[in-house]
Amino acid sequence: MAAEASPEDNAPEDNAQGDSAPEDNAREDASTVDDDPVEGPIPPRRSAALIVGALVVVALVAACAWLGYLVWSDHREDELRRSATEDATRLVAQLASYDHTDVDANIEAVVAEATPEFAERYREVSEGLRELLTSGQGTSTGTVTHAGVQSVDTNSAVVLVFLDQEITNVTVPEGRVDASRMVVTLVRDGNRWLLDSAELA
C-alpha cells in the first residue's frame, strides 16, 4: 500500500507556482508600459515644420487682407470719380442757368448745394447782376457737354467741365450759344459734393 503524500511534499510545487506570479505580473506591467505613448519634447524637425506652417498661414491671411483692401480702395475711388463727375455736371448746369423772372429761385438753388464760402461770394455777385438781368430780360440754359475728373480723394475733387450756355436777352432775342471750359472744385459733405469754386479755364 503506497504511502500518502504529506502536505509538506506538495509545498515546493505550490511555492514554485507562487514564485512565478511576480514574474507574470512583471510581464503584464511591462506590456502595459510599452503600449502607452512616450511623452517628451517635440522633435526639432516637427517643431520647425509647425512654425513654418503657421508663418505661411499668417502670410496668406495678410495677402488676402491686402488684396481685399486694394479692391475696396479701387472701388471706392471709382465711386468717388463717378459721383464727382455727375454732381459737377449738374451743379455747373444749375450755375449757368437763370431766368430774369425768378432770379431768387436761381440763386437759392445754387446756394443750397455750395460751400458757405462759395455761397457768400455767389450771393454778392448775383445781387450785382439782379437789376441787369431783370432789365435786360436775360435767360440762360446751361448744358455740360463733357466732364472729366482731374483729381479726387475722400475730401475734394477737381473736375474739368465743358459748358454750352444758350443765352437770350433784349440784345440777342434770337439767342446765342457761348461755349466755355471750367475748372470746378468740389468738397465732400457726407454723401454729397458741394460746389466750392468754378473758374473759367
Image: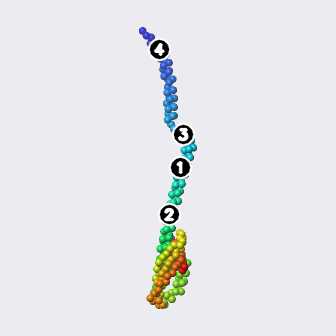
Q: Which mark is residue 53?
A: 1
Percent coordinates x, y for residue 36 in the rendering: 50, 36
Percent coordinates x, y for residue 132 in the rendering: 51, 89
Residue carrying label 2: 72
Out of 91 and 172, give the one closest to the viewer. Answer: 172
Q: Which mark is residue 39?
A: 3
Q: Are marks 4 and 2 in contact (CB under 8 Å)?
A: no
Name the amino acid, label 4.
Answer: Ser
Q: Earlier in the sequence, mark 1 or mark 3?
A: 3
Q: How is the image coloured?
A: rainbow
Which secondary structure, mark 4? loop
Q: Residue at x 48, y 81 (%)?
A: 164
Name the amino acid, label 1.
Answer: Gly
- Which dot, 1 or 4, sits closer to the camera? 1
Residue carrying label 4: 6
Q: Residue at x 44, y 11 (%)?
A: 3
What's the CA distance linking mark 2 and mark 1? 29 Å
Out of 150 and 57, give the one closest to the viewer. Answer: 150
